[in-house]
Amino acid sequence: MSTETSTLVAEAESGPRPGRAGRRRSSEWRYVGSKLLGSLGALLFVLVFNFFLFRVIPGDPVRTLARNRLVSDKQVAELTQTLGLEQSLPQQFLTYLQNTFTGEFGLSFRYRQPVWDLMLDRLWPTLLLVGTSTILASIIGVYLGMVSAWNRGKPLDHMSTGSSLALYSMPEWWLGLVLMAVFAVGAGPIPNLFPTGGLHSSDVDPASIAGVFDTAWHLTLPVITLTLAYLAEYALVMRSSLLDEMGEDYLTTARAKGLRDVYVRRRHAARNALLPTTTLVVLNLGFVVSGAITIETIYSIPGLGLLTTEALETPDYPVLQGTFLIFSAAVILANLGANLLYSWLDPRVRT
Amino acid sequence: MSGSTPTQRQLAWQRRRQSAGRTWADFRRHRSGMFGLGIFVLFCLMALFAPLLADESGLDVTEATGGVLEGPSWDYPLGTDQNGRSVLTVLIWGSRVSLMVGLLATAISMVLGTLVGLASGHYRNFFGSALFRVTEWFLVVPFLPLAIVLASVLGPSLLTISFVIGITSWPGTALLIRAQTMSIEARPYLERARVLGAGDWRQMSRHVLPNVMPMVFANTTLTVVIAILSETTLSFLGLGDPLRESWGAMLDQAFEVGAITTGAWWFFLPPGICVMLIVMSFLLIGQALEEIFNPRLRERS
Amino acid sequence: MTRLLEIEGLEVSYRTVSGEIPAVRGVDLTVDAGETVGLAGESGCGKTSLASTILRLQPANATIRGSVRVGGKDVQTLGWRDLRTLRWGEAAMVFQGALHSLNPVQRVGDQIAEPIVLHDTVPGGDVRARVGELLEQVGLPPERARAYPHQLSGGQRQRVMIAMALACRPQLIVADEPTTALDVMVQAQVLDLLSSLVGELRLGLLMISHDLSVLGTTCSRVAVMYAGRIVEEGPAWAVFQDPRHPYAGALSAAFPRIGDRAARYAPTGLTGDPPDPQLLPSGCTFHPRCPVALDECSVHDPPIRLAARGRPVACVLVGREGDERSAAQRS
């Protein structure tokens, strides 16, 4: 991981340049602009990829989509029309773009509802699950990594690094299954403390105060699972970055100035170590999404992730395409946001 | 020295063998790395000697003799699955699939990633930067949704999974190799080679590639980790070959038949533990290799 | 009268897996107010290890013997609070390689202000004004305070380091390779700046460098270090023009003087490399590379002889057939 750290940070570092106010501002804008363009390019790439995905397979796309299933002629006609297969390829692409930007993703094979509506319905649980987990995992993971680095070689470090390694090595959904077996079903002396799935109990109004608590109770195990899964990586990366940083010369300067050791470690070393940590974490935003998909599946949380895996059965291609687009767009945007945040934190990149 | 003077090529190979020997000696000193290597070797042996360790007929659903989801016993050390097969047998045979797919996917990813990385680092023209852009875009697209969509179109099979993992995990390698290529090419001896008339291919294969190889090697372990975890996840989601057992597929079945809720821990714990162990072993090997190839890290310890 | 810096019998060694490695093997050094003392030597001779002990910045695995006194106080045994007050308040360091010695993501003005606020040098006053004042003192416009280290040139960064060192009005400044990696013109500027500051503020300056010519022009006294020991000490121009120890001679000869036609055609250097601290040669550690070594040099430690008043030299040849030896050296 450290090799990646050094190469990535090396790319971000720039040489000395006498700064002028005007030039500084324009180079900041240039950086922002280039990141925006990059994100747009990635989005376009995803759109094109999505478009061609079902059209590069030899044979009639409709037949492919309808493979292994009994499809009536009416449905075939519907599908052909939606895909616009009578038109030329460039025109199809335009139709596709048009459809995408108007939120017209077609009808789900399984639910017979507009995909857009389905996705909107399922958005909130996913956001709740993923948002809570990433925030918790970032705070705990970074703190754990920091403490490990400061106490390098001591038992605390070994324990923390060892357990982070173990957590990182297991599929997050397997961890979920184990936690489910122990705490939701009950193993040995531990009673079943949590529900095995779902987001709401059937007898509670989700909008009421009791409902909020009920939702939280249902989300406890999923959030714990995801938090543990995410924080392992954050802790390992932060520890590694901080160890790299602790060898730097400017910390000696800081100590020579009379600053306390604790202050030097926190204000200078740890703060600077957050930069490569952010970079590496951003690179793995896709993992956040994967976690959402698998955890929702095993805990039956009605979010976008569960929607995706359910769509695999049919296979419900319109839904699959829709969720793929949404997930990709979300990650691309999050990437952009993180890059901009990084440039705000690290002046070397924008000046 | 007696005999004819060794050619340049032979000298080069001698040097490489010597440095490989030194690397191995360094690696042996890393306790955690050796531990990881040990576990990896154990699993390899398990996969290779599967026919000897467990009768293949034990996989046949129609010949299963055990009860449904029975706990561990003398006949069935890890109990039985929902078809009455010995879980231990399925576990041992499953190691083959998990390892094979993992390594195949890694091979695809490494070859693709190294080629693209070398090319985009070496060619400073439009071609090179175009490759770089494409690499960046691929990197941003989230893995699992992409894998799901691809696998659903291509149909469930092990080859699909290998292919899907391979083409979604190469960007990380490519970026790393690219950065390394660019830093190597900035070195004076490469400039000298260029001035002396070395063509693109010669430069890349003779000069850049050998220097990049150590990093490729250390990165491979990380790629294998991703590949194995991905294969397990994709199999769990039902995208693997329904006829071949892998650890992920075992867990999928465990989940489907409610082994969690009935507490059949012998069914869902062993496969997960195996995945965890083998992934950990690669991580430890990778960490040890990284410390060897990056002397700066060594100074810290 | 308490001297600004008084080092007596200093020994520094590092505890490592391969054993205890000696870096400084018995050094005496003093610096008074208004004095500029130079410490010369190649890399690995122990000069940076020595410098690190002055503010007790040596690494955790270092063992210190002997005493290092700053303003009369023994730095190595001071309590933490007193040490932190002493650091920067009485003695400050100008580090080498300013790009890495400055926090890359903090504005230089903030970095200069940090010790000021900590030591409360400007009680209730305008810290920003003080920072601007310091920058002007080193020849930089006060607006530069808003710059980040990477936006400044090498020479500018070095000036920032000097400004930062002056922030809490110390009496002693230790400059570790202040001009290495700078262009010659910029080098001259920085050295001029240091000289004028020493004169203006009556500071004591200990300048460490491998470049004897730099020390020769800026310092009043110079000590030459080799393998952890001081091998020659004396007035700067004397050591530079008329070195008595063979090593000092080689160091001095490595820098050709303008007008010296012979030096241009016969660049002088030393064979071999500085000794590995773990495998120091017996007797005089310099004897393997010494052009005028005698048999006894490999057996006995060299005695410290006075070549003149205030001119200790660690060589058996001092005082013995003096002219013959120095003639042999210059050939």
Image (cartoon, coloured by chain):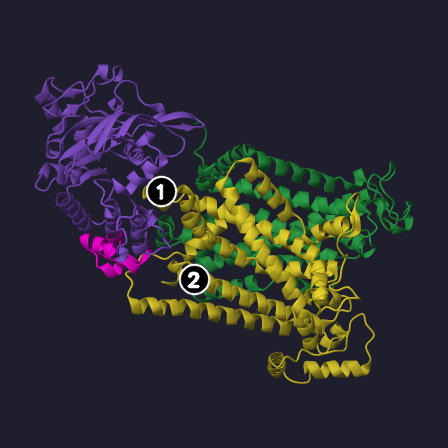
Chain colours: A yellow, B green, C purple
As drawn, B57 above or below C246: below
Q: Read off the magenta span.
A: C129-158
Rendered location of residue C82, percent (x, y): 32, 36
As drawn, A74 above or below A160: below
Which of discs 1 and 2 lies nearer the camera? The answer is: 1
> Which numbered disc covers residue C142?
none
The type of residue carrying mark 1 is Arg
As drawn, A213 above or below A233: below
Q: CA distance from mark 1 to mark 2?
A: 27 Å
Tell me if mark 2 has few (under 14), some (14-19) or many (20+) residues whose alpha carbon lies within 10 angstroms of its own.
some
Task: Identify the image quadrant of residue C243.
Answer: top left
As drawn, C211 above or below C1: below
Rendered location of residue A213, percent (x, y): 70, 62
Magenta segment main secondary structure: helix
C174 or A287, which lies in front? Answer: C174
Residue in view at x 77 percent, y 43 percent: B92
Residue A54 visible in the current orientation:
no
Please give the chain letter of the residue carrying mark 1. Answer: A
Rendered location of residue C197, percent (x, y): 16, 46
- Give the side of residue A202 with respect to residue C54, left or right: right
Quick one: label 1 or label 2, which is nearer the N terminus? Answer: 1
A56 or B224, which lies in front? Answer: B224
In the rendered image, the residue lying farthest to the front is: C124
Identify the element where label 2 is drawn: helix
Please give the residue where the numbered disc 1 appears in the rendered image.
Answer: A255
Q: Is C139 in the magenta? A: yes
Please give the residue where the numbered disc 2 appears in the rendered image.
Answer: A343
Residue in view at x 62 percent, y 36 percent: B35
